Image (cartoon, rainbow, N blue to C red):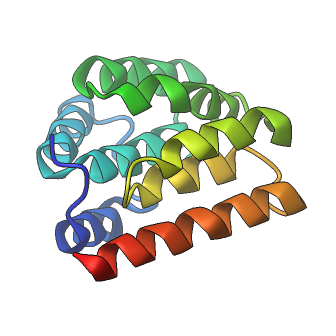
Amino acid sequence: MREYNSGQDQTFADRIDCRFPYNEHGAAQRLIEEARGISLNAAFCVLQEICSPPHPPPVTFARQQELLGQWIAIVDHPLVEAVLPCANALLNREELPSMVAAPILTRVGQHDGQLAALALVLSATDDTAPAIRVLEQEIRLRWEAAATSD
């Protein structure tokens, strides 16, 4: 699976942002599969949509859990296991302590261009905590430097 595809990732993210078809089983499955075909970053866009508080129409917690299970079954990458605590925290409307989120951010930072995974982690913790803000900035700067050197 491709790590990221900046042009396609953004187009895909814009298309599903606040419009994920939670209750349309076939459409949701197809979007998960489409995202995987685009890139890992696009797949993480879907994960964030699945786990974030849904926009109308309402979706049950059980359906979100089902979608999370489908996503896990389809997206195969070592980073998946690292971000699952964040996905579950979002799903359960809980906040991860900074000391739990920081090592996850570090792990995400090892995978260039994973902006959606980064956003997922930041959504699951207090992103105003100084240690988290510094770590996020370091990761973004490192990714930007890597992108300009390619």
Q: Residue at x 25, y 70 (%)?
A: 6
As drawn, is 74 to the left or to the right of 72?
Answer: left
Give percent across and percent down for residue 94. Answer: 79, 33
Residue 2, above or below 144: above
Q: Residue at x 32, y 52 (%)?
A: 41
- Count of marks placed on residues: 0
Q: Can residue 56 be seen in this snapshot?
A: no
Q: Can residue 32 be seen in this snapshot?
A: yes
Q: Nearer the viewer, residue 3 or 92?
A: 3
Q: Residue at x 68, y 37 (%)?
A: 103
As drawn, is 3 to the left or to the right of 145?
Answer: left
Q: Residue at x 46, y 39 (%)?
A: 50
Give percent across and percent down for residue 77. Answer: 30, 28
- The quarter holding residue 143 reads bottom left
As drawn, is 90 to the left or to the right of 119?
Answer: right
Image quadrant holding the N terminus, namely top left
Looking at this view, name the residue that lies furthest to the front.
149
Looking at this view, name the residue that lies furthest to the bottom.
148
- The quarter holding residue 16 reads bottom left
Give percent across and percent down for residue 123. Answer: 67, 51
Give percent across and percent down for residue 57. Answer: 49, 48
Image quadrant holding the C terminus, namely bottom left
Q: Nearer the viewer, residue 23 or 101?
A: 101
